[in-house]
Image (cartoon, rainbow, N blue to C red):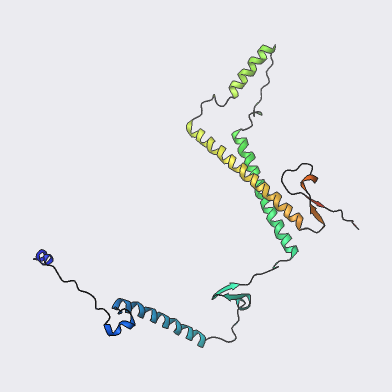
Amino acid sequence: MSSLRNAVPRPAHKERSQPQARKRFGLLEKHKDYVIRAKAYHQKEDIKKKLKQKAAFKNPDEFYFKMINSKTVDGVHRPKEEINKYSAEELMIMKTQDIGYVFQKWQSEKNKIDKLTASLQCTEEQPSRRHVYFAEDREEARELELQAKSKTDISAIHIPKDIKKKMDRSYRDLEARKSRAKDLEKLYMDMSMQKELQKKGRKRKLREDEILNPNGKPVYKWKADRKR
């Protein structure tokens, strides 16, 4: 029976439109439109009620430092811009602390590079073990030299796969640490230059034709100051 009921065509129920006499008021509001409008209205009324309660129970002697250290821009509280918050001496101390931290990290990277290089034996020109051989003539010396090179040749030695993977990983780590140490060294030099430029004294930046060995970096010259 249900299949027959669904097979019978049903009339399409249309929503009632705005009467002709009320066309000037626009489209006729449906129930779902009324629900949305009512929720928005009650939400605004609740906000007004809370604001009235806060204004009624407000303490006139209440004070916060944000009241004088901030301002309202387009309804949003923004802190005032603090100009010259620190003195020149305080800025110099903070700059020195930053330079010390960068220098410490640079030295730490250098020490790690040295340890990693020593463990990997990257310096093939300076082997860890040396043997002294005595030869009777040049031909025997040449044969001994070839034998020593074949013994120290790493490529000729069979290395297990797991050890080779660890070595490759260590070499990649070594290259990354070298690059990081280079960046830290450059940052340390730049920060040291900025610190020196903040000190007192007359100075000027040299032109390229005045520099003996130009390398693209700025060079400054301080004028001689007479010491008392």
Image location of residue 20, percent across then percent down: 27, 83
Seen in the picture, residue 172 relative to 64 is either above or below; the reply is above
Q: Nearer the viewer, residue 208 or 97?
A: 208
In the image, taking residue 101 as reference, residue 75 lies left or right, namely left
Choose top left, top right, bottom left or bottom right for residue 69.
bottom right
Seen in the picture, residue 153 relative to 218 is either above or below; the reply is above
Q: Residue furthest left?
A: 1
The N terminus lies in which quarter of the figure?
bottom left
Q: Residue furthest bottom?
A: 56
Image location of residue 101, percent across then percent down: 67, 53
Please give the name of the residue rendered at 62% of the width and 18% of the height, measured from the top-left corner.
Answer: 146
The C terminus lies in which quarter of the figure?
bottom right
In the image, taking residue 164 as reference, residue 39 lies left or right, namely left
Seen in the picture, residue 130 relative to 102 is either above or below; the reply is above
Answer whether residue 136 is visible to the viewer in this image. Answer: no
Q: Nearer the viewer, residue 215 or 15?
A: 15
In the image, taking residue 2 as reference, residue 153 lies left or right, namely right
Please give the name of the residue rendered at 58% of the width and 42% of the height, measured from the top-left corner.
Answer: 176
Image location of residue 173, percent across then percent down: 57, 41
Seen in the picture, residue 108 relative to 154 is either above or below; the reply is below
Q: Residue furthest right?
A: 228
Please give the name of the residue rendered at 61% of the width and 21% of the height, measured from the top-left corner.
Answer: 149
Image location of residue 33, percent across then percent down: 32, 77
In the image, taking residue 179 as reference, residue 216 lies left or right, namely right
Answer whether residue 204 is visible to the viewer in this image. Answer: yes
